[in-house]
Amino acid sequence: MYRTLKKFFDFCGEKERRQFYLSIFLGVFNALFIALRIPAVYVVIKAILEGGLSKKTAFAAAGIIAASIILQTVVSMKTTMLQTRGGYNTSSFKRLEIAEHLRYVPMGYFNSEGLGKVTSIATNTMENLSGIATRCVMVVTKGIITTLVIVAFMLFFNIWIGLVAIATMIIYLIGTELMIRAQSKDSDIAVKAQDKMVSRILEYVRGIAEIRNYDLFGKSITNVDEPIDEFTKYSTRMETVYEVAMFLLSILNKLSGVVMILMSISFYLNGSMSLVYAVMMIICSFMIFESLDQVGAFNGLTRTIENCVDKASEALSSPTMDIDGKELEPKDMSLSVRNVDFSYDKRKIIDNVSFEIPQRSTAAFVGPSGGGKTTITQLLARFWDVDSGQVLLGGTDVREYSYDSLIRNFAFVFQNVYLFSDTVENNIRFGKPDASREDVIEAAKAACCHDFIMALPDGYDTVIGEGGASLSGGERQRISIARAIMKDAPIIILDEATANVDPENENLLMKAVDRLTKEKTVIMIAHRLKTVENADQIFVIDHGKIVQQGSHSKLMNEEGIYRRFIGERKQASGWKISSHSV
């Protein structure tokens, strides 16, 4: 228990740690105020037994008890507020710290660890830490301190009964520690099952259209059921261990109480203890075990705290790229890739690739799916670090820039646009957080989306659903382009930005792209002829290598992937449904 609490306090920020330490310190006074009732009751009982309870004594005892209740209530409120603030602030700040940390991990982290695990840490783990940890720290420390104070009083009345109380407390704490260890393995498995459960549920929700389309409910639900059943199984086993252990410890408490009562009666009968002391020992035996029961009830949750801290610490310790470069301004917006190799999970994705892209020129990457086109463009903006070779911006290795000074030079427009559950205005403003409404409208007009935005129920104040689900694909793309226009980065990377756009939106989208890319360095991944043939350079990527490069006309005069690619596109675009009636 001590190790877990220390781990939790070390995990907290300095301010929150001080709040917890202060609350524990105040907990000592809280216990003393509770214990004040013991001498007050002692004075009253002694006076009654001696047949001389006066009003003065009765009022004095009542005053002490009232004062102890008031003081205990005030201190308890203060300790509760301190621990609540400490717990929720820790959870809040660690969420932000994790989010900031994940900005700088390689993108492969999200592929290998899974979105479900990250989501689980940011939600369940942090929620448990703020709620369970705070409550557990508060009750366990309060219970132990109160128990120790009452034991001190018992030692004062009778050392032998006090030693029995100490032995009971030690056995009780050892018992709860053994219970935690017995739960340990099941707890670890339950935590992993919870991560898997979140991941499967996310996958299920995202694929709900395909599941409905192919009537896969039974099979898909089975995929979700598996981690849910596993989580249920091991959580139930943990609860079973807890209930059995707490039942046995509760029996121990009650039997120890019986022993102390019998000892008190025995000492009174043999004349070694006065009646008033015997009565006080009996009262104390009930008070001490009430506090111990509180300790046991929450001590079983300390493993949950440890798991939460370990998971959050794991996310915070995930390897990041070296982002502490210099705050540099590139001398120009040219890009160079020199002998670059890159592997993911020991599988080579990019194999000894080299090329140059002069500033304010347009380069297009084409080739079979899975050939490495997207990976190359992401290496340019340092989404990953290369295994070997160099990527240079303005003649300087991208690893020499601080990440923030590097990424401000790039704007991406992806094939699959993600919009946040927020207003249209704020989604566009992501490109420039301090932009005015007028700037947002200007960017939207440039991206050809002002008209459809004004047709929305609340215009720019319309809240769109998560992922932009309430908008069409073309509308989402144009808002994404407006966001990129707002950023006004000198290098634009278009990752098949027009691949899934319907013909009605294509002309508007191409106008928006033209506005976005004017006077910029442009790198595009595209499958459409009209977006490729006017590029200054075309790179054909296959199996992680550049197999052809040159202008459209040059590549059309060569036998190879590009000419076949263009031929297939022309054939596809010329295909028509016959009007001949059958």
Image (cartoon, helix red, strand yellow):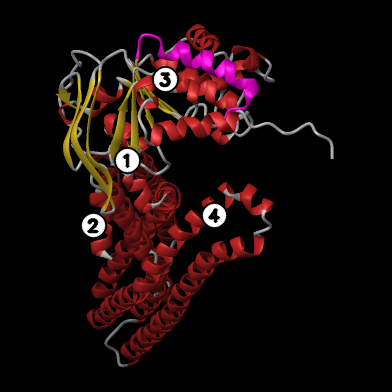
3D distance between C-alphas at marks 1 and 2: 26 Å
Q: Residue at x 44, y 64 (%)?
A: 193
3D distance between C-alphas at marks 4 and 3: 31 Å
Q: Pinpoint residue 441: horizontal percent, then vertical percent.
A: 53, 10
Above-or-below relation of 358 to 574: above
Which label belongs to residue 431? 3
3D distance between C-alphas at marks 3 and 2: 42 Å
Which label belongs to residue 121? none
Circles 1, 2 touching at the beta carbon (< 8 Å)? no
Rendering quarter of residue 51: bottom left
Above-or-below relation of 91 to 113: above
Q: Nearer the viewer, residue 288 or 49?
A: 288
Q: Nearer the viewer, residue 269 or 1?
A: 1
Looking at the image, tell me whether mark 1 or mark 2 is earlier in sequence order: 2
**Three-letter residue code for mark 4:** Ile
Crowd tier of the residue under label 1, counting other residues whose Cα lies within 10 Å: few below 14, some 14–19, many 20 or above = many
Residue that lies at the very extreme toward the bottom in this rendered image: 270
**Element at label 1:** helix
**Three-letter residue code for mark 1:** Leu
Look at the image and say whether residue 331 sits in the magenta stretch. no
**Three-letter residue code for mark 2:** Lys
3D distance between C-alphas at marks 4 and 1: 22 Å
Above-or-below relation of 144 to 377: below
Which label belongs to residue 201? 4
User: Would you name the residue on which mark 1 appears?
Assistant: 102
User: Would you name the residue on which mark 2 appears?
Assistant: 6
3D distance between C-alphas at marks 1 and 3: 19 Å
**Element at label 3:** loop
Rendering quarter of residue 488: top left
Looking at the image, tell me whether mark 1 or mark 3 is earlier in sequence order: 1
**Quarter the C terminus occupies:** top right
Q: Residue at x 60, y 33 (%)?
A: 465
